[in-house]
Image (spheres, rainbow, N blue to C red):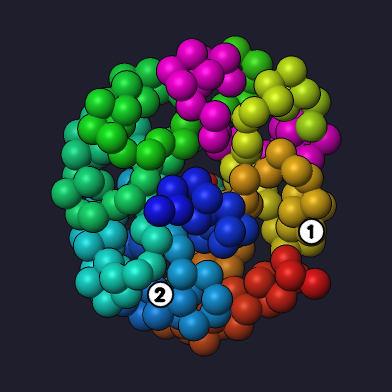
Amino acid sequence: MMDIFEKIHRLGILPVVVLDDVKDAAPLAIALCEGGLPAAEVTYRTAYAHDVIQEMKKVKPDMLVGAGTVLSIEQVDSAIDAGAEFIVSPGFNPSVVAYCIKKGVPVIPGTATPSDIEKALSMGLSNVKFFPSEINGGVKAIQALGAPYVDVKFLPTGGVSEKSLLDYMKCKRVLACGGTWMVKKEWIKNGDFKAIEDCTKKAVFTMLN
Ligand code: 3PG
């Protein structure tokens, strides 16, 4: 069976979702799937993350849904309860990572320095988030940072856009790119799920061409 990291790698792009209302979860899941990216990292930046994850899995059971901005063990439990298949965090939180390992849930902790990466390696992880990517040097930083750690793959997020997408995609150290650019706040606010679907299609097209 394909593991979660392989699934994320094959998708190439991981939409990062911040929803303020659970009613947007179903139409957003449909728009992302129709756009060609049946995946979401639903962030615990709002109180609705648990219900959004649950709703997305209900409406699109085959969609790959994980939890993002997970900062505590309680949020790991909440995400697992909702049906999240993986956990992402912005930084390296040893207790969150240890708890995910204990629970058998794939975890992608945030890193931005060699020390962060070595902490991940010491806990048996080889897939990490690189955050915030653009401000930390983007592809060049990933290449330099990854040079000593040959088996580590990075999920860059933070400032990744359709413009920078191709450069990231060409980099062999990139697991996939994460970002919110296809899930813009104003589109959600205006219920413009067609714009989300179109932007998602455009991102997939850019990635494949
Ligand atoms: C994340 O949580 O991964 C990032 O904040 C997403 O960053 P972006 O909004 O710049 O894509």
Q: Is residue 136 magenta?
A: yes
Q: Identity of the amino acid at label 2? A: Leu
Seen at 40% across and 36% down, the residue is: 107
- The answer to whether mark 2 is within 8 Å of ligand 1 is no
Residue beneath disc 2? 28
Q: Is residue 199 magenta?
A: no
Residue beneath disc 1? 166
**Pointer 2: residues within 10 angstroms few (<14), some, or many (20+)?**
many
Residue 40, numbered label? none
Looking at the rendering, which quadrant does residue 18 occupy? bottom left
Task: Label 2, secondary structure: give it.
Answer: helix
Seen at 20% across and 54% down, the residue is: 82
Q: Is residue 46 above or below residue 201?
A: above
Residue 167 in the figure: left or right of residue 159? right
Q: Identity of the amino acid at label 1? A: Leu
Q: Is residue 101 above or below residue 64?
A: above
| Foreground of the two, 57 or 46 | 57
Magenta range: 117-142
